[in-house]
Image (spheres, rainbow, N blue to C red):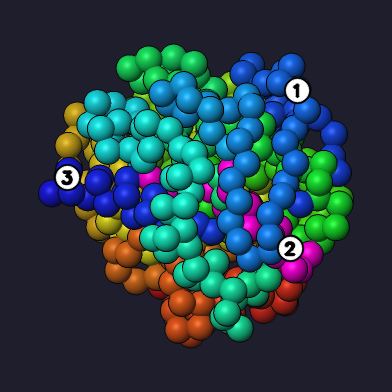
Amino acid sequence: MRAITWLVMALVTATAAIGCGGGDDDDGGGNPDAPDGVGGPPTLTGTPGQWTWTDVPGTSCMNGSQTGFGVNLGTSGDLVLYMEGGGACFNGFTCSSVAHPNGFGANDLAAAVRQGGTEGLFDRTSAANPLKDATFVFFPYCSGDVFAGSSDSGFGGRIQVGYRNVGAWLDVIVPQSGPVRRVVVTGSSAGGFGALYNYDRIEQRFNEKQVFLIDDSGPPMGDTWLTPCLQSQMRQHWNLNATLPPECTACIGSDGGGLVNAIPFLADRHTDRRLGLLSSVEDGVIRSFYGFGYPTCSSIQPMPAGPFAAGIANLRTEVLAGKTNFKMLTFAGGGHVWLFNDFETTMTGGQTLGGWISALLDGSAGWDHAGP
């Protein structure tokens, strides 16, 4: 059961997920792996509505191969930066099923488009999708570190520099983003964690734009649930402490915990921005992930549904208490990944998925937590 559940986490968004000035990237404060001397950036090209691959020097997958990003030009003033999901690599078992261990290039983008690149968020025909006319940029996930790592010697000697990759991609995209009105930083599963983790640096790069966060199925939880012993493994193998914003001192606990404090940090640092988190209350895939540390690091079973639901409730009622700009849309059951659902028919708490996201983006006064 454990192997099947984790494999679903590795594959569900890897196969379904597809989806333009600023100065030099400061890499969120203190990334020792920031690329330099890579030459002039490639130029974004393509035909509106069609996917185009762009190779980006200075990027690296786990196997050391160069990667890039996909772009699908839209006709509105919206830019969506979407981070792909697909597991996480921090021990022998998880690394055996993580997405794209052998790299990601143009052929992989084409395969991903064929396997589901027009659904949900990427459905350009749905009137319920407020981002149907956006320019989509697809960040591939081949580093196994939820786009947060800065280690040239990660687990088993793998190159896990997803945070550096995001910086290199931004170096290409930001200078060409003049006409953009709104930027949506988003992703699913591992990419949801990555969107939240990288939001602060991306908002700073696009500081004259409206920058939103939609974290799909990447819920950081308090240390009771996302235990310090599990966090310590990720900090060690991915060199996380080097990529966290230095101002978020509470994000680095003396016992290895504290990552949940990134949520109130972002809410307080960006009070004029809106940030959202989508999650089911018993997400079976994320329960499998958290089970590697719950209740102890010797655990080999997924976290039970009850404790996970308690962690989701804690996020909403305690961690986000009083935060008017960071809200959650939750769904009953154990489903995983919501941005590929139909925006018109997917409902919870009396709201459609598309309606809640529209309210987030449009500044509606009634936007709030919704769902069980």
N-term-proximal mark, 3 vs 2: 3
Tell which of 161 and 293 is nearer to you. Answer: 161
Question: Marks 1 and 3, Cα distance to the nearest angstrom?
Answer: 45 Å
Q: Amino acid at mark 3?
A: Arg
CA separation, marks 1 and 2? Answer: 28 Å
**Residue 77: % across, % down:** 79, 64
Q: Is there any visible trace of residue 104 in the rendered image?
A: yes
Give the mark toward the camera: 1 or 2: 1
For residue 299, above or below residue 189: above
Q: Is residue 55 above or below residue 367?
A: above
Question: How dense is the environment of label 3, judged by Cα within 10 Å: few (below 14), some, or many (20 and up)?
Answer: few
Element under disc 3: helix
- Name the residue at 76% across, 52% down: 20
Give the residues in magenta.
69-86
Q: Is residue 234 left or right of residue 258?
A: left
Image disc number at residue 246? none
* Quarter occupied by the C terminus: bottom left
Q: CA distance from mark 3 to mark 2?
A: 40 Å
Task: Name the secondary structure under disc 1.
Answer: loop
**Residue tagged by mark 1?**
39
**Residue 78, disc:** 2
Is label 2 in a helix, a strand or a loop?
A: strand
Q: Residue at x 68, y 71 (%)?
A: 133
Q: Tag 3 or tag 1, which sits nearer the N-term?
A: 3
Magenta run includes residue 82: yes
In the depicted view, which residue is nearer to us: 25 or 61? 61
The label nearer to you, 3 versus 2, is: 2
- Percent coordinates x, y for residue 195 in the rendering: 57, 47
Circle 3 is placed at which residue position? 2
